Image (cartoon, grey):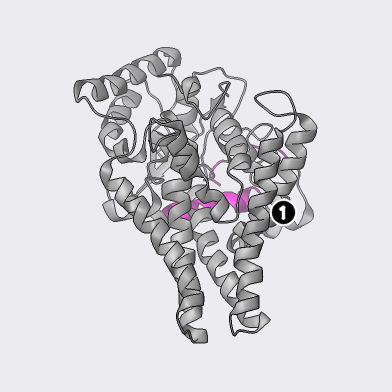
Amino acid sequence: MSFAENENLGDIHAASFEPLTHQNKIMENTNRNTKEFQKVLKHRVHNHFNFNQANMKSTGKSYLKYMFLILSFVGLYISLFSVIQTPLTLWLCCLTMGLLMAAIGLNISHQAMHGNISHRKNVNRFMGYTFNMLGMSDYIWHIKHDVFHHSYTNDFENDEALKEGDALRLSPDAPHKWFHRYQHYYAFVVYALFTIFWAFALDMEKLNRYNRNGHPTKKQGHDFSQLLKFWLTKVLYIFAFIFLPLSFLSITFGQWLIGFLTMHIIASLIITHVLQVEHLFTGVANPSAEEQSWMSNQIQGTSNFKTKNPILQWLVGGSNYQIEHHAFPYISADHFKEIQPILIQTAAEYHITYYEHPGFWIAVKEHYKYLKLCNYSGTTRIQNP
């Protein structure tokens, strides 16, 4: 199966990137054929699954995890109304729901939208609705993430992950505003509120912009069924998490606001920091006119972090294996540990950069250094000072 054959991606095109030096971590690209690299790597990875007669989708253990996460989130929500609660226990429930919200998004929603949970489209589609359960649109995520981000990683003109409002300048090619010079100080606050902004503003902005500019894969407006689902699930989320608690719980508006913000802040801080550190760090490969294979572009524009920690991998749904995910987005995160040695060996043979941060907090530090470097005006490529 090729990348373009992934059922959730539609037509995609390769972007081009130029690697940059990063303190002995970034190797100089040679003139070796990166098209051959892509072909060899795919052949080796697919042979691994064929030889072991293994399924590329989620394993039975992951299905148990998915059930545990969803039932825990729904169970805590029901307990808000069915169990006598104090303000403190209500707040603790909201805090825990924030943790579960992040875990569901990273483990289930993300994997489902890539078609990685099952070979059955209906199963992936159903599990993808967990995005809507958390307040976000599965449809908009598919367009901005599966289509644009995975096709044009780190290319500001096309990568929608770099266009999440004007509060942060996430690319040296993005428009520069005066307040961006302070973004490495206030970014933490922006990240803390991101899922609220995502649910109630960004989804609407992208729905309008995609509709006006045409659907990126069909070159036409949105289907009525998608629009109906979009607005219906938004209304249901507002009904479930705003109207019902304020109407049936013995709490003040202020207490509800604290609980609602707690849930979203916890989820936001986890999701944003896990996802941002994987592409936006000092020394990351940036788009250029140099033509390479799509595979080498993905690997050199991405980084892993702390892949030897099985607990972290379980919690973040394999997002710490981001290179493996971007190279093979149609393979479940359950198998990233198996194929990682194949990627490392093949990348070394073809002098392709394979970058991994040794720890999560190191990756976070590198991300904030990147934000600081991005606060300067102009389009100069990000390098280490």
x%, y% of residue 82?
47, 77
Q: Based on the displayed image, in which of its 4 quarters is residue 175 positioned?
A: top right
Residue 307 vs residue 198, the one in the foreground:
198
Residue situated furthest bottom in the rendering: 86
Please say if 64 is above or below 237.
above
Query: Residue sitting at 67 percent across and 80 percent down?
Result: 253
Query: Residue sitting at 54 percent across and 54 percent down?
Result: 133
x%, y% of residue 62?
31, 46
Task: Characterize the local packing of mark 1: few (<14), some (14-19) or many (20 or more) Cα atoms within 10 angstroms.
Answer: some
Q: Can residue 197 be seen at all in this image of the molecule?
A: no
Query: Over which residues does the magenta segment extend?
Result: 362-385
Residue 6 vs residue 29, the one in the foreground:
6
Question: In this figure, which residue is indicated by the disc labeled 1?
Answer: 201
How many marks the image carries: the answer is: 1
x%, y% of residue 335?
30, 36
The quadrant of the rendering that contains the N terminus is top left
Query: Residue sitting at 61 percent across and 25 percent down?
Result: 288
Which amino acid type is marked by label 1? Ala
Query: Residue sitting at 46 percent across and 82 percent down?
Result: 89
Is 384 contained in the magenta span?
A: yes
Helix, strand or loop for disc 1: helix
Position of 107 compared to 142: left or right?
Answer: left
Please say if 277 is above or below 211.
below
